[in-house]
Amino acid sequence: MAGVIMHVVAFGRLPQLDRLGRPKAFYGKRVHDTCYRRPYYDAGLFAETFDDDNSKKGYCLYKLGCKGPMTYNACASMKWNNGVSFPIQSGHGCIGCSEEEFWDNGPFYERTTKVPGFAVESNADTVGKVAAGVLAGGIALHAVGANISKRKELMKRIKSDKKNEQNIDS
Amino acid sequence: MANRIVVDPITRIEGHLRIEAEIKDGIIVDAFSSSTMVRGIESIVKGRDPRDVWAFVQRTCGVCTTVHALTSVRAVEDALGIAIPPNAEMVRNIMEGALYMHDHAVHFYHLHALDWVDIVNALKADPKKTSEIAQSISSWPKSSPGYFSDVQKRVQKFVESGQLGIFANGYWGHSQMKLPAEVNLLAVAHYLEALEWQKEIVKVHTIFGGKNPHPNYLVGGMACAINSDGAGGLNAERLMHVEKLLKEGKEFIDKVYIPDLLAIASFYKDWGGIGKGIGNYMSYGDFPTNGYADLSSFKFQQGVILNNDLSKVHDVDHRSTEEIEEFVNNSWYDNYAEGKDKGRHPWEGETNIKYTGPKPPYENLNVEEAYSFIKTPRWKGMPMEVGPLARLLVGYGRGNEEIQGAVNGALSHLNVPVAALFSTLGRTAARGIETQLVANWTLEFFDSLMNNIKNGDERMANTDSWEPSSWPKEAKGVGFCEAPRGALAHWIKIKDEKTENYQLVVPSTWNASPRDPKGQRSAYEEALIGTPVADPNLPLEIIRTIHSFDPCLACAVHLYDEHGNHISQVQNISSCDS
């Protein structure tokens, strides 16, 4: 709301809106695309349950129902309350509250979800890929093979970081 | 062609509490309290995953932005027998403590102060004298004559431009405004400071819950995993940020809110004898320190006081069908199958809306029949007042030395007797006193959290019963808390992994409800009886008493003479809705 007023004051015109009437300046990108946990998603590293080791490491919350992949908002880039945090940073998946009829877009903690704009209901493992591919306008599907190789790469980096840390400590 | 901007609704905090008061010889002789908007959240959550319900019911209110989520996860945990880790308990306590600080300070400065403070009169103040007063009551640094002179100039600009803005809807120059100009200026300065301050304390919610309003909660604990040696969860940086916010919050409470409260109250001691209310007070208790199941560990104790008798405190049992019941005899709902005058325990409660009131726009409600969307809750058939005053009186009656010390300290400072607590002034003072207590406790909760982590306990959620397949076929639970506005509880029934029934009985339901089948008034209605009204066209006194409850609904006050003639209708800025 404040952003819209600022826009009018700054530019002397109303902001452009998307098809749901949301200002594009704030709702133009998916939470998923701006999320700092996105590399874990790409690498296939997920929190499996709340408070497990993976969630403590800050891995992707997609399997715990995060609606970031189908939610257009600026939470991950602007963050909340002057940039202090946003839901995913504080360990809870996005509930998709800026999407049309979000309360009926599937339970908050289930991956299987009805993605707005699709006629068919997708299952857990395809939703993210389909959403990424179609909603973002043709970004390539995440090939399983690519994920595995990225995961290997990431794990390698984590290991080497640990080694570096040990070297520094000793 | 001109662009048209439509903002609708301009605010969600306006217009759905309605008071109709009857006046005779300048004194209120009867009053009716009505909510003209329906909540209906209970119907929305039926059939949903019980783990999701907190997010729906949390949106009952944007101001007390955590309490419905907290109460909901507690209800589900109670139904499923889930005990949360100590860290999660402390994080929930800290978040609730931060809410108290925010909510009570905002109520005092932004929703209630203008009932007592004359903004326009502050222009007549001598800033040097205001500075002397400020420095005599507090060590808060912003207290120089130059500072108050600048504030005065800002207000002067507002007034001269004819755009009082946030201050437009006041009772400036009313004969019942008693503060000297210098104290008015002090209060105006702190009104503006509190606006800035309140943006900070809510960041505690952002760190633990990801955002404010409406931070995230989780059945079984909290989602903000701890990782003391990593960047992926709560670490030293995040936790020290919380500590800084809590300490700054406490400083503002101690050095601004409390000194201002006592200074302003000292000019309004007569309000210690006005707005007495029903004399029955109830607290559910809150801030557990050894698990939610151990009531003896609660910082605020549970109990009921009857007829202002502090020597006896009765226990409350949320599960007993004999104790808490809701009636709909004067509300816009379908009658229960048992009959119009029967009450129901919330586990068996219904929300079947049936509006029979007048078609808007209307002059007044037909109070001979149903006149509110609020139901009428009773404890053992009796009306109860809930809120800060009820909490402190229950603690006082139970012999809680910390609470007794805080209450007695304020009474002796103001040089008023204990009986002055049962009043409009008492409610407003109790809110400040408990804010100071809670600010201290919140730092204790923070220390407890840090000690746990130091000792190697980094658990934040108990997910043993997370999967619905592990639940019993049927279960029922109750969650309760002390919301800033008073005793709040949710009752849930779970069947086949879904929410079968859900009922909220919120603080303002207790305080603002219509009459029960015995004709007994609830707290708002009763507290107005006997209140003098100096100017029926500007019924400031009604607003003072209703605001002293911190109503969860905005006020539209309507005043009638003894023949039912409409004297005035006053739209009034007010608070939140839960």
Image (tube, rainbow, N blue to C red):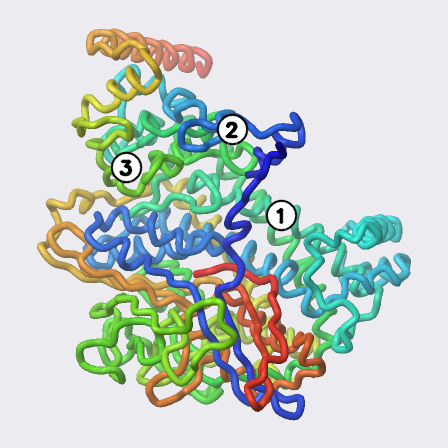
Asked if badges 2 and 1 are on one and the same chain, I answer no
Quadrant where the N terminus of chain A sits is: top right
Q: Chain of mark 3?
A: A
Front-most of residues B287 and B431: B431
Residue topped by disc 3: A50
- For disc 3, the neighbor class at 10 Å (few under 14, some 14 to 19, many from 20) is many
Determine whether, in the image, residue B143 is placed left or right of residue B347: right
Q: Position of residue B359 (x, y in %)?
A: 42, 69
Does dot 3 land on a helix, a strand or a loop?
A: loop
Front-most of residues B229 and B423: B423
Front-most of residues B147 and B15: B15
Q: Position of residue B376 (x, y in %)?
A: 36, 76
How far apart marks 1 and 3 lie (CA) works out to 31 Å
Say which amino acid is labelled 3: Phe
Residue topped by disc 2: A78
Front-most of residues B319 and B405: B319
At 44% across and 38% down in the image, what residue appears?
A: B210
Q: Chain of mark 1?
A: B
Mark toward the viewer: 3 or 2: 2
Decide: is A71 above or below B33.
above
- For disc 1, the neighbor class at 10 Å (few under 14, some 14 to 19, many from 20) is some
Q: Chain of mark 2?
A: A
Residue topped by disc 1: B248
Decide: is B539 above or below B488.
below
